[in-house]
Amino acid sequence: MAGNSFGTLFKLTTFGESHGTAIGGVIDGCPAGIELDLERVQEELDKRRPGQSAIVTQRKEPDMVEFLSGIFEGKSTGTPIGFIIRNSNQKSKDYSHIKDTYRPSHADYTYDEKYGVRDYRGGGRSSARETACRVVGGAIAKQVIPQIAFTTYTASVGKISLEKGPEELDFSLIESNPVRCPDPASAEKMEAYIREIRAEGDTVGGTVQCVIKDVPKGLGEPVFDKLHAQLGKAMLSINAVKGFEFGSGFEGTRMKGSEHNDKFNPDGSTTTNLSGGVQGGISNGMDIYFRVAFKPVATIMQKQNTINSKGEEVEMQGKGRHDPCVVPRAVPIVEAMAALVIADFFLLNKISKI
């Protein structure tokens, strides 16, 4: 299986399955001498871990990261940083009913078609459990570029949307509720809706908003390696992501060029920021902002018609522990992938100037 690594200079490679002994990764390209706060890394993991509230999967995993290499006396050594996160709460029997059955809209069928074998226990490698490794990588990446600030939060759940703009929000409230929405009134509605959906044995999607501040000018390349193109690839590689909207996004299609153009100030900043902080694939120093769309989780606790490995029509019903909405736990994953992209381009930009 190819495609287990992400990045050019600052590169993360992950391994492991949902119900294996452990998941883990190797971070290559981290500069030597970076003071690393490993407690901060664990704090990021705690935001993603299962069982953290009543509106997420109740799988109980401590998700304690163990670093194996690349760190000495609290600093990076410049060698590969290896780490593992042990799996401790597998209930593989919960998946025996889908050993030969394909869940609708899940990776079950495509994995079997491509590889001729699949680990049906929690989806194996296709499980979102793999994203815990991304959070570790992103947490290290943020410490390579501490001058750059990342803010990520839930913008919508189903049809319930956060109507306030970023300038109207108090970002200190993001972690004050299980939905990770900085507006308490909207958060309350979202949480109630997720509980309602769970009671129905169903699932629901939503969107995550990310804002990146203090990004230096000049990150990104103008052709295939555009900064926003790499951010899009990073986000679309996350489980359940179905869309990436950058800057003005689709709303910009409703505007005229005279309305959409960001006029310059004498210092090179712009009076508006419909470009989303990137022009010509290169950061312009303004805030970078984007939204990521997550579909409803494919495994639902309702009966569905599907097929098995013999092509026979069968009826199935989801079992086990699953998120009724992935969005609250996806917030730190989106932020981690954004940090991996920005850190990689930051290091590439330094080399290009040598």
Image (cartoon, rainbow, N blue to C red):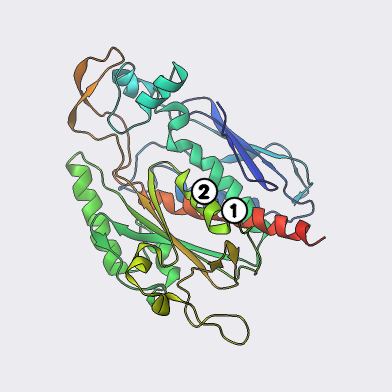
| Above/below status of 255 relative to 225 | below
Disc 2 to disc 1: CB gap under 8 Å: yes
As drawn, is 323 to the left or to the right of 151?
Answer: left
Quadrant of the drawing holding the C terminus:
bottom right
**Could you tell me residue 66's position as x and y percent?**
63, 38
Quick one: SS at disc 2? helix
Please name the residue that numbered disc 1 is placed on.
Answer: 341
For label 2, the crowd category at 10 Å Cα-Cα, with few meaning under 14, some 14 to 19 and many 20 or more, is some
**Could you tell me residue 123's position as x and y percent?**
40, 28
| Above/below status of 180 relative to 200 | below
Q: Amino acid at mark 2?
A: Ala
Q: Is residue 119 visible?
A: no
**Which residue sits at x=29%, y=27%?**
103
Alpha carbons under labels 2 and 1: distance apart: 7 Å
As drawn, is 338 to the left or to the right of 104?
Answer: right
Closest to the observer, 41 or 102: 102
Marked residue nearer the N-terminal end (2 or 1): 2
**Which residue sits at x=70%, y=47%?**
9
Closest to the observer, 220 or 12: 220
| Above/below status of 32 relative to 100 | below
**Which residue sits at x=18%, y=33%?**
302
Per the rendering, the mark at residue 213 is: none
Q: Amino acid at mark 1?
A: Val
Please name the residue that numbered disc 2 is placed on.
Answer: 234
**Which residue sits at x=44%, y=54%?**
331
